Image (spheres, rainbow, N blue to C red):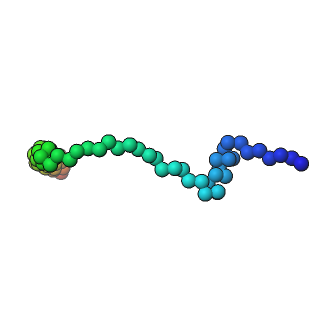
Amino acid sequence: METFYLNRKEAAMIKPMFGYRPKPRKFNYPFRHHDPEKEKSRRERLQIKRNHKKYHQGRSVLMYALGLSLVIYIMYLL
């Protein structure tokens, strides 16, 4: 009678057939105290930065559009 041995790769392929599921990852999340005043000041600071970015972004898109239209106009004239 011949004995049958599985190597690691074959054993890894057979595991899912028998309902093997990896254990969920555990983590230890440190408790943070919620400070409403600090959160409010942080939100206001981010709001100011976001408004500045939106305005600047719109202006740069407008400049690119004007530049592209100028290039197309010059190509049309030639």
Circle count:
0
Is 70 left, or right, of 9 in this rendering? left
Residue at the spot x=66%, y=44% of the render?
A: 9
Residue at the spot x=22%, y=45% of the render?
A: 33
Is 52 left, or right, of 23 in this rendering? left
Q: In the rendering, at what x and y percent does residue 25 appear?
A: 46, 47
Residue at the spot x=32%, y=42% of the render?
A: 30
Q: Where is residue 38, by image quadrant?
A: top left
Q: Nearer the viewer, residue 21 or 31?
A: 31
Residue at the spot x=60%, y=54% of the render?
A: 20
Q: In the rendering, at what x and y percent does residue 48 appear?
A: 10, 46
Q: Nearer the viewer, residue 36 or 74?
A: 36
Q: Residue lying furthest right in this view?
A: 1
Q: Is residue 1 above or below residue 17?
A: above
The answer, for residue 59, to whether it is visible in the render is no
Q: Nearer the viewer, residue 76 or 3?
A: 3
The answer, for residue 15, to whether it is visible in the render is yes
Q: Nearer the viewer, residue 50 or 11?
A: 11
Q: In the rendering, at what x and y percent does residue 65 appear?
A: 16, 50
Is 57 left, or right, of 4 in this rendering? left
Q: In the rendering, at what x and y percent does residue 45 appear?
A: 12, 44
